[in-house]
Image (cartoon, rainbow, N blue to C red):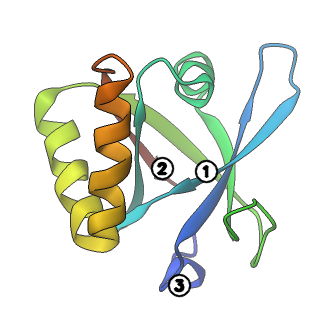
Amino acid sequence: MKLDQFEKQQYLNVETFRKNGQGIKTPVWFVRDGEALQVWTQAGAGKAKRIRNNGTVRVAPSTGSGEPTGEWQDARAQTNESPEAIKHVETLMKKKYGAMFYIFGFIGRMRGGAKYTAIKIQA
């Protein structure tokens, strides 16, 4: 996967696939972690459920509304709900997004102490 196009980007559009093969595109915040991209999301989110079922994804840098700003690339994704993985990605996200990440995390906790998962995306 060519990671250069994701440099200095704020959003990643992740296309995950339902059991019937229908693609669902979702813009998300992300961080680069070596040769992978990482996403921090609620464990019960649709994208996390679809990735647990089928790790095939497509990704492209995008605007916050999901409009691609680069080329779509095929990739593989996997969730990891271990405390170590979640803490690692949370630390990277705080460094990249700063106060906005804290605000969204606070809102998530106010909604009922949501569980989170790390999603690792790579070629």
Q: Residue at x 81, y 66 (%)?
A: 67
Find the distance from the CA under tag 1 to the CA under tag 2. Answer: 7 Å
Circle 3 residue: 4
Q: Earlier in the sequence, mark 2 or mark 3?
A: 3
Secondary element type, mark 3: helix
Circle 1 residue: 75
Name the disc covering residue 121, or none.
2
Side of 99 where 19 appears, left or right: right
Q: Residue at x 23, y 50 (%)?
A: 90
Three-letter code for the amino acid on which mark 3 is drawn: Asp
Q: Which of marks 1 and 3 is nearer the N terminus?
A: 3
Residue 74 image point, x, y percent: 69, 54
Secondary element type, mark 2: strand
Q: Nearer the viewer, residue 43 or 80?
A: 43
Q: How would you rate the neighbour count of disc 1 (Cα within 10 Å): few for under 14, some for 14-19, many for 20 or more?
A: some
Three-letter code for the amino acid on which mark 1 is drawn: Ala
